[in-house]
Amino acid sequence: MIRTAWLSLSLALAFTGSALANPVSRDPAKLPAGDYELDSRHASLTMKVAHMGGFSKFTMRFDKITGAFAYDPSKLAATRLTLSIDPKSIHTGLPSFDQELAGPTYFDTAKHPAITFVTTAVDPGTDGHGTVTGDLSFNGVTKPVTLDTTFNGFGPGLLGAGTRLGFSGTGSIKRSEFGFTKVSNYASDVVDLQFEVEFTKH
């Protein structure tokens, strides 16, 4: 069993070695045009809320995210990205609290089954550091949000198939603006956002 596993790993490394050796390009103007889909296995969105004035930042993660965008390098700023997050996939490490957050007291997922973000403007910035502005719809409220982004580059996908690219980003929102005012004595109004995403084109 162990020998078979090592053989499989060796073969995988042999096939992917050439792809991994290729340099990742960080020039978005060179990214191939086409339709890109989010690789949900390599995507995460976390929220951090300061607890009781800042003793720590309570961290929550959404495990189910989908998204896509169409890309034209001649119209980079016009790129429109759509992300959809399943609020029932909230993960705090505390199963009973996850259920409470997904229930009617907080996210009310039966009434609001998706959190969405649709870009309205893209500023590629310089050296891969730019901003993305879009409409965030959360708890039945839609507000504009600007995220600081880093383009991590693009290159060949697994086994050299297709094109893969990645972004990282940060931002913040005020939860009260989206109707979340409970436990304000124990949790900050400002919520820090951090995301990591990869997209693929086949």
Image (cartoon, grey):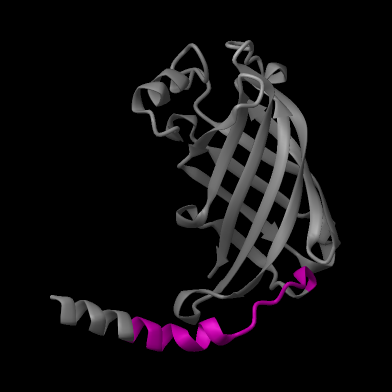
**Which is nearer the eye, 176 or 190?**
190
Residue 118 on image: x %, y %: 69, 40
Residue 73 on image: x %, y %: 78, 68
Q: Quadrant of the N terminus?
A: bottom left
Q: Residue at x 72, y 18 (%)?
A: 177
- Whether residue 25 appears in magenta in the rendering, the answer is yes
Q: Residue at x 68, y 58 (%)?
A: 70
Residue 154 vs residue 96: left or right? Answer: right
**Which is nearer the eye, 48 or 171?**
48
- Residue range corresponding to the magenta coloring: 11-29
* Residue 136 to residue 198: above or below: above
Residue 42 vs residue 70: left or right? Answer: left
Quarter holding residue 6: bottom left
Residue 125 on image: x %, y %: 86, 59
**Which is nearer the eye, 71 or 156?**
156
Residue 149 on image: x %, y %: 74, 53
Q: Majority secondary structure of the magenta segment?
A: helix
Q: Residue at x 53, y 52 (%)?
A: 43
* Residue 2 to residue 97: above or below: below
Q: Residue at x 48, y 52 (%)?
A: 40
* Residue 27 to residue 83: above or below: below
